[in-house]
Image (tube, rainbow, N blue to C red):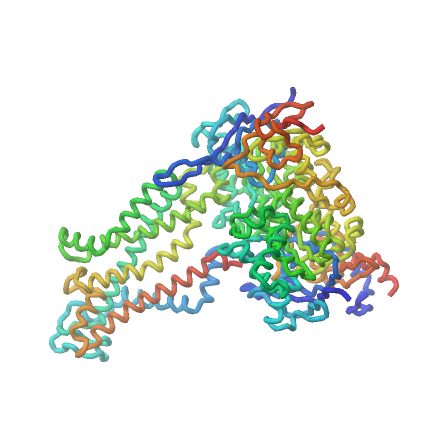
Amino acid sequence: MALLEVRNLQTYFYTYAGVVKAVDGVSFSVDRGEVLGIVGESGSGKSVTAMSIMRLVQQPGKTVGGEIIFDGIDLLKLSDREMNSYRGKRIAMVFQDPMTSLNPTLTVGYHMMELLSRDPNLKTKKQKIDRAIELLRAVGISEPEKRLSQYPYQFSGGMRQRVMIALAIALNPDLLIMDEPTTALDVTVQAQIMELVKEIQERYHMAVIFITHDLGVIAGFADRVMVMYAGKKVEEGDVYSMFEKPLHPYTEALLSAVPKLDMDRSQRLYAIPGSPPNMIAPPPGCRFHPRCPYAMRICAKKMPVAVSTDDREVYCWKVFKEMGVVESV
Amino acid sequence: MSMDIRVEELKDKSLWEPIPESEKMGAEALTAPQVTFWGDVWRRFRKNRLAVIGLVLLVIILLFALVGPLVSPYPYDKQDYNAILEPPNFAHPFGTDYVGRDLFTRVMYGARISLAVGFLAAMVQLVIGVLYGGISGFMGGKVDEIMMRIVDIMYAIPILLIVILLMVVLGPGLVNIFLALGFFYWLGMARIVRSQILTLKEEEFVLAARVLGASTKRLLLRHLIPNAMGPVIVTVTLNIPNAIFTEAFLSYIGLGVSAPMASLGSLASDGVEYIRTAPWLMLFPALTIALIALAFNFVGDGLRDSLDPRLRR
Amino acid sequence: MSKNVILKIENLKTWFPVTGGFPKKVVGYVKAVDGVSFEVYEGETLGIVGESGCGKTTLGRTIVRLYKPTDGKIWFKNEELTHLSDKELLPYRRKIQMVFQDPYASLNPRMTVAEIIGEALDIHKLYKTKEERQERIYQLLETVGLVREHANRFPHEFSGGQRQRIGIARALAVQPELIVLDEPISALDVSIQAQVVNVLIDLQEKYGLTYLFIAHDLSMVRYISDRVIVMYLGNVVEEAPSRELFRKPLHPYTEALLSAVPIPDPKIARQRKRIILQGEVPSPLNPPPGCPFSTRCPYAKDICFKEKPQLKEVGGRKVACHFPLE
């Protein structure tokens, strides 16, 4: 059984201008020890998906439907208190901006001690301090003894993200959700952090949901990839086959919008026309159809159904047609 | 394969034809509704019930103060010894005072003075405060340092001292209060505008205008000040009741208007003597001040919420 | 050489004073740009790459004279711009333009698109009649792929990519020869970046523009640039034709930077050898005494900590390293 199974998740935002269906019926699962990458652009609903799993969606947002089955329990049915015992302990999260998730008036040591007090195996203060030092060392922070008494602002961006990772793995969670953890960092620091995340994932055999807009980052890390567009899943599959032969026109377009290693200016990049949809009034049918080069009449009328092959799941009428299903009916 | 669609629906061959280019929506079509900045502000302001109540109240007070005296049958200084200390009645809705003057008319005139003081405070803030703060923030460096220290020093002088000094020089009168308020009311605004300009001048659209060669005047008047207007307007509306209270206070302690002119402060002060026998003399002027202040505060709060860019979606 | 130099930078330094105490005293300098020299040729795209804090944005802003250089010289063709006053600079403002990073902050929210683009025309008095002005605005909008109906809309009604094209139209309005592009696509979604890049390339071909393309996205820089300059801590560490630089970096920092770039191909991404740098960029307030990269360089030797290497020619390229990679 999968560690996490999300079924038909719906998280809506009730704004002044209307209802934004930020996540609109998304289903996926994550196995133990597996790395699932979620790729999408701003407004695709990838971060809201993560926040929904953690049950951290803020007003005016609300998860209005679906199930989030974690280790056999539907998280959406838990009381706030029960949910709290899952957060940090069984499911941990690392955010894009570490500064907002660390209290600037408290030392890094305080943050760690507070979290470690939830660990029943650590009884004395000495044990907790030792564990905190061990964790900081594990994420590559030098002189951890000294660092414990420092405040978040005394850490650089990359170091803060390391602290966040140390906090996230402190209670040995089964699932780690990372929401654009390297987006705010420089490439060389990003490479350091990704190296660390890979090492930790392998060492603790953790399941990871890695959310990013950067196809390059996901290519080097994920086992499976899910592509989101305008609150919907459009394609999901094995990382190798998806990058080798994307099936959904959006995935295909994304991959050809970034320059390949051997390209120069004489070959133009594929520019996806138009802009991401206004989420208050998304286009009918397939949400990508106004920007899709292959759009057919049905795409503007009906939401695509899932087309599944052994390692892929695609929501696209073009793929549906090419599978030969239409002729057979 | 999950099939929540009836198969027959998919048999229509035309469904599987490509959408012709001519039927596609333009790639550059704008999906966001067309609203101007102020249109958007108004939309949000309208949804705030207290703010709308404040605005309506303000309009009523304005009519009361500006049009009221023109249609009132009594001049503000007309004494009527047949109607001394009358309680509120049909002929005199707010009653009459100890020499038989119609309080309703006198309160209307008093409200006029209050609003004039408010208007003056607003103008001083908008003209002197915005320009002073704008120049200080824009120039930066030494100029800014000196201009702001001047503001600091002026802040340290109590307003009462200025009014008393002015009274010694010019004799008692409303002019003193106007001068004193004019002297003070731009200080806070200058600070607010300065800090706004300091942030705004690093914004990329201002840099872009500089790269195009925009003059200082253009930068200030087209780019910096219009974008600082949100907090400016909120501060102005929230400062007006302060100025009105200050005037009322000064008039109450006898440093303001002289008889037979009346401001809400001096009316209330006169009324205190009769608080047991004719409480309306104190009540109505005081109530009017409170209403004016309340109305401006409601509107100011409403504006702050609707101008706040963080609330814009 | 047939190539004409359009912009020449000589030993440019832009330092920002750090003040403290009472009365205020200068206690130090942030050496954002610390002695940079290079030339830009007419019609080419020169890429400038580096991580945050390397001084690339400050360099771009100094070139358009948003900042006063502390030292050094800026030449545009045969004119020295370094010390010109705002008034004297005005004719050059027409020749050198800039496109900014943040499409949400670079357009005045209180002005319509027509006013934003028209302002450029107003400042330089580039029209005789109102109709001519209007027509020119429409033309510019169409040049960047927008439509004339957009003229009376406000910036917030547009998407990020559209806004960035409005910013490009504003820069184009004065018919510049050189445009400094300060991270023009890094704030945009991947699906939108290509739109803007394609517009930039089209415009360059049509008007023979020269670009200074500042970015941290190396794959895009490699794609769009003829030559590339790599900056680290206010210094140029390497300068080379784009293709050669990416094929064979000479500076250890360039090598590490290239190996850190994520590649959207799982097979290559997992096979390649990566050089993971230790530590982070030192503070420009207090740069290391020797080579600026010495604190993180995996190959650093004694001399690197003592003596700052100068940018010198190595086989038609330039590198600032005591021990360039073979």
Q: Camera-side residue: A173 or B122? A: A173
Answer left or right for A172 relative to B228. Answer: right
- Tell me which residue sits at (77%, 69%) in the image: B4
- In this rendering, the answer to whether B261 lies above or below A216 is below
Residue C326 in which image quadrant: top right
Answer left or right for C70 relative to A197. Answer: left
Outermost residue, right side = A328
Q: Camera-side residue: B273 or A127? A: A127
Answer left or right for B197 relative to C180. Answer: left
User: Residue A294 in the image: x percent, y percent?
Assistant: 76, 53
User: Residue B257 in the image: x percent, y percent?
Assistant: 18, 61
Q: Camera-side residue: A120 or A214? A: A120
Question: Is any atom of residue A290 visible in this view?
Answer: no
Residue A224 in which image quadrant: bottom right
Q: Quadrant of the C terminus of chain B?
A: bottom right
Q: Camera-side residue: B221 or C275? A: C275
User: Residue A254 in the image: x percent, y percent?
Assistant: 71, 49
Question: Is any atom of residue C188 visible in this view?
Answer: yes
- Tell me which residue sits at (51%, 48%) in the image: C112
Outermost residue, left side = B81
- Tell me which residue sits at (56%, 43%) in the image: C101
